[in-house]
Amino acid sequence: MRITSILLSGLMLSLSLSVHATEEHPGKEIHDEGCLSCHKGTKGRDHDAAFYMREDRKTKDYKRLHTMVQMCDSRMGTAMFDEDMQLVTDYLNDTYYKFPKK
């Protein structure tokens, strides 16, 4: 009985970890819906690491990244909530930039 409980607990833990590992970043969907109308790469492909990490990029730190997200929101009139802009900033940073969050 005890072995069955341990095995069942292990199975439940591994299932929850595998589901968590496949979840997308919470800011990705907001980015894709609100930002990709302008941020399309060549031949209609979405921007990728090559775009975000190019040498001539304007974004040099986390604060500037957040400012850029706010500026884009204002220009596009997407009227994102502050929390959504933070999620998009974190998505871009976690996925591409890896700036320290000061």
Image (spheres, helix red, strand yellow):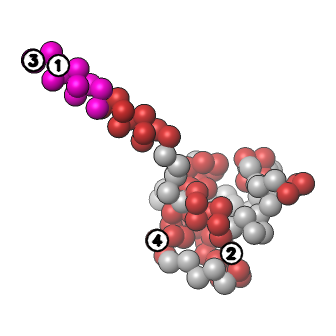
Per the image, the residue denoted by label 2 is: 72
Q: Secondary structure at mark 3?
A: loop
Q: Using the numbered discs, state the Cα–Cα distance from disc 2 to disc 1 in whole angstroms.
A: 54 Å
Per the image, the residue denoted by label 1 is: 4
Q: Secondary structure at mark 4?
A: helix
Q: Secondary structure at mark 1?
A: helix
Which numbered disc flags the more N-terminal residue, 2 or 4? 2
Q: Residue shown at 58%/65% (left/top)? A: 30
Q: Residue shown at 58%/60% (left/top)? A: 29
Which residue type carries mark 1?
Thr
Residue 74, percent from left and from top: 65, 82
Q: Using the numbered discs, state the Cα–Cα distance from disc 2 to disc 3 in whole angstroms.
A: 59 Å
Image: 54 above or below 27: above
Determine contact: label 4, label 3, CB under 8 Å: no
- Horizontal side of 8 relative to 46 (left or right) equals left
Q: Using the numbered discs, state the Cα–Cα distance from disc 3 to disc 1 in whole angstroms.
A: 5 Å
Q: Residue shown at 54%/70% (left/top)? A: 85
Which residue type carries mark 4?
Glu
Magenta segment, prevailing SS (helix, strand or loop): helix
Which numbered disc flags the more N-terminal residue, 2 or 1? 1
